[in-house]
Image (tube, grey):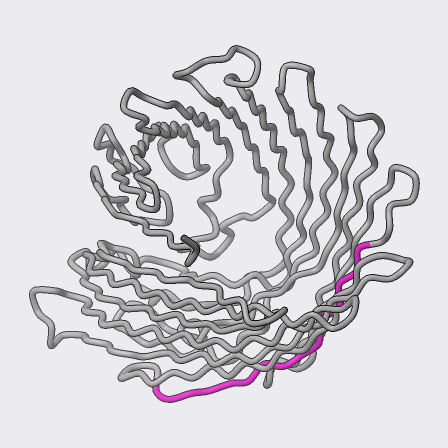
Amino acid sequence: MWSAFYRSTYHIRKSDVNLSVGYNDKVFGANSFYTSRFPNQFEKTGTLITQASLNIPVGNSLLMPRISYRRHTDDFVLDRYNRSFYHNEHATDIYGLELQARFTSRIGLTAIGGEVTRESIESTNLGTHERDKGGLIIEHSLVPISQLFTSFSAYLYNYGEFGWKVSPDINARFQISPKLSLRGSAGWSLRIPTFTDLYYISPDNLGNPDLHAEEAKSYELGIIIKSKWNTEMNLSGFYRLSDNLIDWTRTNEVDLWQVRNVGNISTKGLDVGLDFRINEWLDSPLLQRVQLGYGWLQSNRKAGIYEWKYGFGYLQHQISTKVYMILPLKIRSNLFLRYFDRIDKVDNTIVDMKLSREFKAVEAYTGVTNLFDREYYETGSVLMPDRWITAGVKISYSGKP
């Protein structure tokens, strides 16, 4: 696997021109990801992302036009030792055009915009399809009233055959004291079926062109506590109700996996986070920061008559630890330990590590995922990779002497 990314900003009079381009190339085994019936799968993907945007000041407003293009190619073989048995190649193109305006007033900061997107696919298996999305966006952050900070947004989109959909949300934070605040949010979201969900056909999978859009309502309440030792605690609880949840299901091991709207699912959870900025109160040259987290989920989803490929094995408990250090020779070390317990899997502990060193405008880094080479599963029957080592270089150039 390799990837490259370039981003630059040019200042022309009072305006900014932003350009970015990135490419990612992957070749991997895809072991049992789409089906456990054929474990020797092979896949090669390539993703190109380009974007250009302008920031144009006009009085107390800011105009932001943006164009984007994304191309994704996928070469998939169900049995790498018998390529002719099942071989699928497809290319997806997404073109986007957006215009947004931001302006301030006595009641706060407002953003209004519109977006048009065309998505198309050419596939040896899924066929040739295209669909358009267009809509309006409005966002507003109110001027703080006493210690109350409030923002809201609404997205009104037309998704072609799925019709008009609206996604509103509201966020609020009440600052009780400099070290104590309450926050809450509520919102509606949706997921449109992908081309794969709608049209995919293989010896073990079957799409469904009659799918409905998946919709969800989410609510969250939380508290943020800060101490004089530069320690912060976040505690939040949330509830999510999903309607027409999309997943691949089957009734027995002989049947094909077919994607369906499996019904209404409710999920509740709790997140706890502790952030210790040790270097700010211990003057530690080595240990800089430690973050601890715990997450808990409970869902009413039940297998019933269907076996679920992805949605049933949700993460019930997770404990995470992140340790940031500065080693000799100015080498930065990030250590990430994660314990997780999925409802249908054996619990496990995974350790990742990253080392990096900056040399003026250049940063060299290397990372190890699954440091102790543990065998574990995360989604369905997908066996996660063994110890995985990556390395790369980041180059930054400001254009100033």
Q: Quadrant of the N terminus?
A: bottom left
- Is the residue 141 above or below the residue 118 in the image? above
- Please name the predominant secondary structure of the magenta segment in the image: strand
Q: Is residue 105 left or right of residue 33?
A: right
Residue 109 sits above or below residue 84 on the image:
above
Residue 300: image quadrant is: top right
Classify residue 181 as left or right of residue 9. Answer: right
- The x and y percentages for residue 64 are 63, 72
Taking the view exactly as shown, the residue that stands out farthest to the front is 401
Residue name at image x 69 percent, y 17 percent? 227
Q: Nearer the viewer, residue 391 or 283?
A: 283
Q: Residue at x 62, y 20 (%)?
A: 231
Residue 66: quadrant of the picture = bottom right
Q: Position of residue 368 (x, y in %)?
A: 25, 36
| Count of labels in the image | 0
Q: Going by the picture, which residue comes out furthest to the left? A: 81
Q: Is residue 138 magenta?
A: yes
Report the front residue among 306 and 360.
360
Q: Position of residue 113 (x, y in %)?
A: 70, 74
Please indicate whether residue 291 sits to the left or right of residue 31 in the image.
right
Over which residues does the magenta segment extend?
127-141
Q: Is residue 39 magenta?
A: no
Q: Quadrant of residue 253?
A: bottom left
Q: Position of residue 152 (x, y in %)?
A: 78, 57
Could you tell me which residue is drawn at 84 percent across and 57 percent down? 108
Q: 308 and 320: which one is in front?
A: 320
Q: Nearer the viewer, residue 184 or 105?
A: 105
Look at 54% across and 81% down and name the residue there: 117
Q: Is residue 256 above or below residue 271?
A: below
